[in-house]
Amino acid sequence: MKRRDFVFSSAVTAAAALIPSSLRGGEPQKTPLTGNALRFPPVLQPGQQLTLTTTNAEVWPGQLTEVIALNGSYPGPTIKVKRGAQFSVIFNNQHSEEATIHWHGLLVPELMDGQPKDAVLPGASYTYTFMVTQRAGTYFYHSHAHHITGKHVYKGFAGFFIIEDDAELQLGLPAGEFDVPLVIQDRRSANIPQFTYQPAMMDNMLGYMGDTALVNGTPDAYLEIHKTLYRFRLLNGSNARIYNIAFSDNTPFTIIGTDSGLKDETVQASSVYLAPGERLEILADFSNHQQGTSVNLLSLPFTAPGLQGDSITLMRFDITGTQSSGGVIPQLLPAITYYNYADKLRTREFVLSQGTMATGMHRINDKVYDMNRIDEVVQINELEEWKFVNTTNLYHPMHIHGVMFQVYSRGGNTTLDPKDKGWKDTVLLFPNETVGVLTKFTDHAGIFLMHCHILEHEDMGMMINFRIEGEPTTSTDDEGRINGFAQEQNYPNPFNPSTVIGYTVGRRAMVELELYDIQGSLIARPVSRVHEPGRYSIRVDFTGQGLPSGMYIYRMKASAEGKTLFVKSGKMEYIK
């Protein structure tokens, strides 16, 4: 994407004029900041729960900020998981409002997706549990509560979810302290030290934006670095602000990953747009910088209404050491199989428009979101083009739950900027732009969401429900599925006294399902027989078995002709 200038309607121009001048950003700072050392959220440990509360945090030194935090942390704890692992966490909502956790970019079952319809009420708990099947990459989690997502996220309810796998580790990328996750957010300096969230009509139109940046929840952040290669995982965690990422000295960087993991080729850039909900992974080499110097990470200016597009300094890197990361810029990245447009079965068009406060300010196909309405029905495993038509003078980063998609065209042009290529879950639409993406839902049936990730637009109705119908299948591709076989998370979980385990068989095979206690002792084998292809489920009942409360492991194995075709384990929790 190149820098773009737009002619905005008189309504948007008037909206820009109403933003107080005290909130407008100036030129990037050219003098060193005193600054605050970049903070890193704690890593969630196995067995820990996630408890949501309103609490006070020291965001600005010596001052307390009221935040909506998980485990008292702002930002929320970072979650790190290996691909193929079972993830499970108990979410305790001790906040005064209903809440959910949406696992942004993760391919999870409907009831694990954290949609508004599945809200956890104040004082209640919910167990999120699912297999982590997709590619290694930088994902995140955040609130998705009905009409108050923007408020929750602005006040701190979000965190990283990082997936690793062995294939990525073998690429020799910078690791450890040289692999740095950075969540970028903006706040209003006039409200320091509070995260005051009181959107006016123009905020609801343009999105709630501030004039000062926080990185990993740190204002005026700096990080001391070495003269070496770094990996930065960039997450735009802002409600509405789009960043035009660059270094103050025009240091070039290498883009290696997008929303859903590594690209299939490296891309050199000196600036790149990053919209709310999007992620980018870049490599930056500081070996030519002089020790004792500094470089800022900026958002470069671009023409847009209100605060959108104002330049802003994000953080500072101080070159203080000479240690090598040992990392390299890979010559080859894992291949991606791109969809063939000719194979699409249909095109769905989604027109993004504006209404009024009375009729709904932000609309899709002239409708505002209704939690109880199904707007589209999609068949599993069918390739479709989803065409987003932006008829407004505003920006709209469109996010689709339950799928990784591929951008196919911008403005009718199928020759894409290399930065657009790769697996995505969020795509930025510029004003009056049409973008086509290719989607194929393969993992889970059920009801999912598509919406604008400017959170005020989402909260005011720019969102739809769609239902995926059909039986999931799996394949050994770069999306991490195992050909023809799948084991689902048991439900309910925790359970008492029984739970159901679903599984899919891709070919005629001997299937064994075994149950173990946490010490690894076999306690039951509820399934052991030949299956024809299809979807199956088995109810496991602990009634009268005298088993203690605790965690249990279930393991499915499928084999044919003396070969093991599938092995997968999961955890379930029994509570008497």
Image (spheres, rainbow, N blue to C red):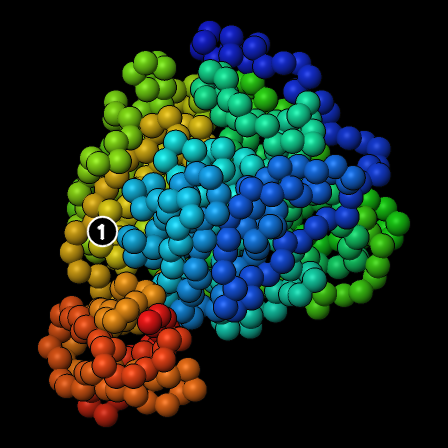
Question: What's the residue at 42%, 48% (across, down)?
Answer: 123
> Going by the image, does 260 lie left or right of 284?
left
| Residue type of the residue flagged with mark 1 | Gly
> Going by the image, does 285 lie left or right of 108?
right
Residue 90 placement: quadrant = bottom left
Indicate the position of residue 93 as horizontal and vertical percent values.
Answer: 45, 48
Vertical position of residue 53 compared to residue 370: above or below: below
Indicate the position of residue 539 as horizontal and vertical percent values.
Answer: 19, 73
Question: What's the residue at 45%, 43% (across, down)?
Answer: 143
Between residue 90 and residue 233, name the one nearer to us: 90
Indicate the position of residue 132 as horizontal and vertical percent values.
Answer: 40, 64
Q: Is residue 34 visible?
A: yes
Disc 1 residue crowd, few under 14, some 14–19, many 20+, Cα 10 Å = some
Residue 415 placement: quadrant = top left
Between residue 301 and residue 421, name the one nearer to us: 301
Which residue is farthest left? 532
- Secondary structure under tag 1 reads strand
Quadrant occupied by the C terminus: bottom left
Q: Is residue 144 visible?
A: no
Question: What's the residue at 25%, 78% (across, down)?
Answer: 542
Between residue 78 and residue 262, name the one nearer to us: 78
Vertical position of residue 275 compared to residue 286: above or below: above
Task: Report which residue position mark 1 lands on.
Answer: 446
Indicate the position of residue 224 as horizontal and vertical percent values.
Answer: 79, 52
Vertical position of residue 67 compared to residue 189: above or below: below
